[in-house]
Amino acid sequence: MALLKRLSYFVAAFFVLLVQKKVNARELHGQAVKKGSLEPATLFGKKSEFERAVSALMNPEFHVDESLGGQDYTNNWAVYVAGATEPVKFAGATAKQVVYGVPNLKAGQISAAIVSVANRGGGGSLDTQNFIMAGWLVSPGDYGDTRTHFFTYWTADGSRNTGCLDMRCWGFILANNSQLIPGAVIDNYYDISIKIFKDQNTGDWWLHYGQGDNLTPMGYFSKWIFTSLQQDATELQFGGLVSFNSSYTSPPMGSGNFPSKGEPAAASFKGVRFVDANGLKTPVTDIRYNVNNDKCYDLGKFVFDHFLYGGPGGCK
């Protein structure tokens, strides 16, 4: 098992080196945006299954993605949304998740837990919607296995043309001392804390990971790949996301248990806070429940800074 983890790490590290050699990211991002030539191409030439799924959070009418052969996909989510009812500016978000395994998924099914910062641009169009996401993800169609992976994701136009999963295109710049790489396998039943925070000097969005308050920089998303997120975030999301095509039923979310099962059976988010411009973590007060299929998934009550979420799936 230890040998497999090391091999997984070195393969991911080699892949990262190829990506970063291909693009001198920070400088080229700025040049491309300023020249109006930001290109959407990913290294794999098509949208990831995760990218298609998150499109549903940005545009609830999204259902069929022609880039994946026109297959009919259903997307379910159970997330708390901060900043959805009042104008608020956030410099970031942080939360602790418990990582779970979902070993019986097939290509065409995904299950994820997400922390997200976003700015929809105020125009209502997908073209103005900027998102950054991080968390854990099981996606056989994207990773070729049923293991749990740490993921990152970004888009500057609601997943229409820009953005990608992990480092499958330019966008995320890995920190030199990071021991965790986007896309790497992570252990189940492991508590991982995530913070996404905008550096007020550079305008870049940094991703930190670790346990408790002991967080390490993983890397950053350059401000130049964004439009509305060159300013502050105006919306945060915390919770679970699943997706499946019409050949299957919906997969489990979180631990596969409803919040009504209580802890430790149900999956949890703890230490849910927004981050202000000074880097201070502040409790979220304006937060909205958002569940689109309560037959299979649910959210527990948001209590101060934590909540339970998830469900067994099995819906068509």
Image: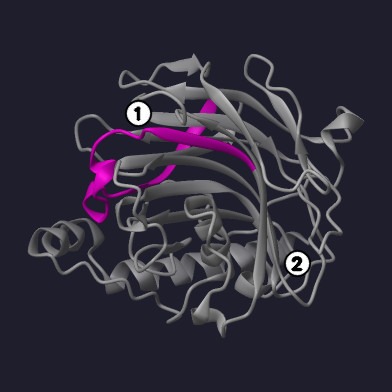
Vertical side of 252 occupied by 93: above or below = above
Q: Nearer the viewer, residue 13 or 254?
A: 254
- At 33% across and 59% down in the image, what residue appears? 171
Q: Quadrant of residue 233?
A: top left
Report if residue 9 is visible in the image. Answer: yes
In the rendered structure, which amino acid carries the disc numbered 1? Answer: Ala
**Within 10 angstroms of label 2, few (less than 14), some, or many (20 or more) residues?**
many
Q: Secondary structure at mark 2?
A: loop
Mark 2 to mark 1 CA distance (whole Å): 34 Å
Let me know if residue 176 appears in the view: no
Q: Residue 148's image quarter? A: bottom right
Quadrant the C terminus occupies: bottom right
Residues in magenta?
A: 214-239
Q: Considering only vertical position in the picture, is 87 above or below 31?
A: above
Name the quadrant of the N terminus.
bottom right
Q: Residue furthest bottom?
A: 69
The kind of secondary structure element at disc 1 is loop
Residue at 72% x, 65% y is 3
Q: Where is mark 1, residue-wise? A: 91
Residue closer to the observer: 88 or 29: 88
The location of residue 263, given as percent across then percent down, is 86, 27
Q: Which residue is mark 2?
A: 146
Residue 178 x, y percent position in the rendering:
46, 47
- Looking at the picture, how far across and down is residue 128, in whole percent? 30, 52
Task: Please state which amino acid type lies under the numbered disc 2.
Answer: Thr
